[in-house]
Amino acid sequence: QVQLVESGGGLVQAGGSLRLSCTASNNIYTINHWTWYRQAPGNQRELVASILSNGGTNYADSVKGRFTISREKSKNTVYLQMNSLKPEDTAIYYCKGRLAWGDAWGQGTQVTVSS
């Protein structure tokens, strides 16, 4: 069983920065393909950024140039560096790790950006 634990959310003013982390609870499986999603109230969950097994990255147009996804394999951890935050970035952020037998999800961390 692999559980993902997120941290780093909080309240920040517009223009500020936050770094989210998501760590696997154990190292029985090294996750190489990670994805961050977010869900704002009343909205569907949307993909924010992903990092693939080959190291390639993808971003939603709304966060390109502001957010950066990275991973630290030795710690089985993925990060989401969020800069120049906007009120519309307010949401619950979820990480997902692709395992050989399926996907694991984090519990979600709240990010609130005040104007």
Image (cartoon, grey):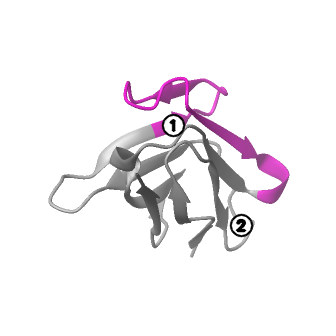
Can I make out residue 30 in this image? Answer: no
Q: Where residue 66 appears, x then y in whole percent?
A: 55, 31
The residue closer to the viewer here, 54 or 9, is: 9
Q: Where residue 101 appears, x then y in whole percent?
A: 47, 57
Estimate how packed mark 2 is, as few (under 14), some (14 to 19) or many (20 or more) residues with alpha carbons within 10 Å: few
Tell me: residue 13, above or below residue 35: below
Q: Residue at x 38, y 24 (%)?
A: 61
User: Mark 1 belongs to which amino acid?
Assistant: Ser
Q: Residue at x 67, y 64 (%)?
A: 23
Q: Give, as a single range, the part of the protein colored magenta.
A: 49-75
Count the labels in the image: 2
Q: Residue at x 60, y 23 (%)?
A: 56
The residue closer to the viewer here, 90 or 75, is: 90
Circle 2 residue: 28
Q: Is residue 51 magenta?
A: yes
The residue closer to the viewer here, 110 or 44, is: 110
Q: Where residue 3 appears, x then y in whole percent?
A: 57, 73
Secondary structure state at the residue bearing disc 2:
loop
Circle 1 residue: 50
User: Mark 2 belongs to which amino acid?
Assistant: Ile
Residue 90's tag is: none
